[in-house]
Image (spheres, grey):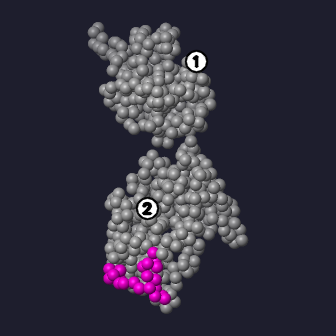
Amino acid sequence: MLESIASGMSPPAKGGPGSPAETTRTSAGNGPHLVPSQRVLKLWRSAQAVCFDIDCTVAKNDQLDLLAEFMGVGDQVAAITSSAMDGTMSLEAALEQRLEVINCTPSDIQAFLKAHPAESRLTTGAKQLIQQLQARGVAVYLISGGFRELCLPIVRALGVPPKNLFANRMNFQVDEETGEVTKLVGFDLREPTGHQGGKPLAIARLRELFPYETVVMVGDGITDLEAVQQTGGADMFVGFGGVVAREVVMQAADWFVTDFQVLSEALPRHRVAMIGSGAWACAAVKLIAENMAAAEAADKFVSEVRMYVHEEEVGGRKLTDLINESHVNEKYMPGCFLGANVVACSDLLEAAKDASVLVFCAPHQFIHRMVKTLAGHVSKDAIAISLTKGMRVRPDGPQLISELIRKELGLDCSVLMGANIAADIAKGELSEATIGYNVLQNAQLLKDIFERPSFYTTLVPDPVGAEMCGTLKNIVALAAGFVEGMGYGPNTKAAIMRAGLNEMRRFAKALYPTVRDETFFESCGVADLIATCYGGRNRLVAKEFVAAELAGAPASFAELEVKLLNGQKLQGVLTSNEVQAILFRRNWEKEYPLFTTVNRIVNQQLPASAVVGYRDAALLPMHSSADHQSSDDLRSLALASSAQMEA
C-alpha cells in the first residue's frame, strides 16, 4: 500500500525563500482570491498531481463527526473538530479526544456505513472533477486527517485507487471480557496524517516516489493550508468553501472556490487543428472528429476540429464551401464523411487559432512555408504531431519535418507513421499506426485523439526512427512499382522489399545513431512498407511509369502525377532526390545500391528493368549528357527543388 511505503520515509528538509512552497505563498495573504491569477491558473492547468482533503471537501461532512452523530455524541465531537480546524487545538489531541468520546466498535462502523452509503456523502461536483483530472492523466490522491475505516468507501465511490489514500487507522484490541476485537484504543501514530504537518509530509513523500513537477492541494481547513507552507509540500493551495467557509483559509488560499464546477471549467479543453486536406489528412481528421464528438470527450476536448484547406475551385465553387456544406472533400476523398464537427478554413492562422494540438498532414515540400506563417501565432503550451512523410535537404544536411516544426514553432512534435492507406482507413477497415514521441504525457494525449476501435496506435519513444521509416519507405515503394510493372512475381518483389527495409534501417541509423532497431518492426516500419509496396500511390505511379516506357511512349513522373493522382502529391520521387543528394555528399551511393538505382531510374538515367540488377546498376559510372543528369546535377536539383517548393 502506498501509504505504508510512504510512512517509512523521513520528513523533508526545510527550505528557504525561493522554494516552490515559499514562492507560491508570497502571492497570497491579500485574499480571498476568488479569481485566480494567471500564474495560479497555469499551475492548476499544469498540475501533474492533485491532492484532495476528504472531510468537508470531497465529502460534505466530517466523517468522524457523522459517525459521532450516529453514535449519539455528535455535539461533543463537533466542538472538538471545530477547535482543530480553526487551529486552537492540535490535531493529535483532537483525534484522541474525539475517539474517546465516540468509543465505537467494528460492528458500529459497519452499521454506520450501511446507514450512510458513500455516494450520499459526496460533495456535488467532486466525482466529476476527479474523473476529469484522471482523464487528463493527472494523478489524484486523497489526504485526510480522518480514518481509513470511514474513508475507503468514499475513495472507491470517487473512482480513486485505495492505494492513493493517506489517512489514519483506528486501533482495536481484544476486549478481555468478551474475547472479541471490539475495544477502541486510539489510532496508529505511524501515519503522517495523524500529526500536525502531516499533509505536507505525505505530499513530500509522494514527490520522493514520483517526479511530479506541480502538485496542488485542495481542502477546507488549516491542515490543508499547511500543505503549501512547508518545503517539499504542494505548489499551490485551493481553498474550498462549498461546505464550510473558514476565514483563515479564505484569506490565505491561492484560490478560493465554493463550487467544484469552477475548477472543472478552469481545466483546459484541448482544441485540435488539422493542417492539410489531402486524402490522408481527410482520413485522419475523420478519426479525430469522431473522437472529439464522443460524449466522453466533452470534458477534455473541444468538439470542433478546424481543418486548413488550400483554397481551390471544384466545379466552379470554393472547396472550403463544399466541405462545410456536405462535410465531404469531394476532390481528395470523395464519399468520406469527415464529421459534422469539422470546419474547413482557407486561412491557416484562423485554422490554428487557439489550438493546443496541431496536426500537420500536408506534402512535406510545403511544411516549411506553413510553419513560417504560423510562427508567433500559436500557443507556447501547444503540442504538435506530424503525419507528413519526407525530409528537407539543406546545404548543411538533412532535416526531418518534426525537427523543422520543433525548431520553428518551439513545440514538442511527435510523429504518427504506419501502414495507413487513406482510403482503407476512411472505410473503417482495421488499421494501425505508430506514435513516435519525446514526451510520454503528450503521446498519451495524442493516443486519445487518434485511436479508434478500427485504428490501433502504439507508442514508441523513437520519433526520429518512426519518421525515417515513413519517409524512406516511399523510395522502396517506387522500386516495388517498377518490379510490378515489369511483370515480375512475388519472389522478386519480396527480395526488393527486404533489401529496401535493410537500406532504410542502415541509412536511418547512419544519420541518427539513436534510432532503435525495434522501431523497424512496428507499424511505421515493416507494416507500412508492405502496405505501401502493395497499395500506395508511389507503387501505382511507378508501375504506370514502366508501362509507358514499355509502350514506347515514356512519361515523366510529373506528368503521371497530374494524370493519376487528382491533385495529390507524389512524395517518393522528391524524397528519392533528397536522399540521393545526401548519399552523394557523403559518398555513400554504392553503400545503398537500391536507393541509388531507384533514383537513376526515376531520373531516366537507367531503364526500369535495372531494378532487378540493382547491385550492379549502382556501380555504373554516371556521366553528364544532353539526356542524362550526373549525380552532381541531381544533388543540385534536389536542393533547388526543395528551395523552390518552400518559397
Tell me the SS state at disc 1: helix
Inspect this view and state whether residue 287 appears: no
Quadrant of the rendered image containing residue 148: top left
Q: The residue tagged with tag 2: helix, strand or loop?
A: helix
Could you tell me how far apart the alpha carbons at marks 2 and 1 are, in whole angstroms? Answer: 56 Å
Q: Name the quarter where the C terminus is drawn.
A: bottom right
Residue type beneath disc 1: Glu
Residue span colored magenta? 614-635
Number of numbered labels in the structure image:
2
**Disc 2 packing (10 Å; few <14; some 14–19; many ≥20):** many
Q: Which numbered dot is residue 247?
A: 1
Task: Where is residue 99? Give x, y as percent.
Answer: 41, 12
Sequence-first disc among 2 and 1? 1
Q: Is residue 92 covered in magenta?
A: no
Q: Which of 103/366 is in front? A: 366
Residue found 57% across the figure and 63% down from its top: 369
Kindly identify the amino acid type of the residue bearing the numbered disc 2: Glu
The residue lying at 38 percent from left, 15 percent from top is: 105
Horizontally, residue 174 falls left or right of residue 238, namely: left
Which residue is drawn at the image coordinates 52% and 82% (left, top)?
556
Q: Tag on residue 467? A: 2
**Which residue in the rendered view is the most extreme toward the front?**
396
Q: Quadrant of the N terminus?
A: top left
Mark 1, Cα crowd under 10 Å, few <14 / some 14-19 / many 20+, is: few
Q: Look at 39% across and 33% down and name the residue there.
A: 207
Residue 629 magenta-highlighted: yes
In which image quadrant can residue 104 be found? top left
Measured as percent of width and height from the top left, residue 358 is found at 55, 54
- Residue 45: horizontal and vertical position, in percent? 53, 38
x, y (%) of residue 481?
Answer: 44, 78
The foreground one among 426 and 310 is: 310
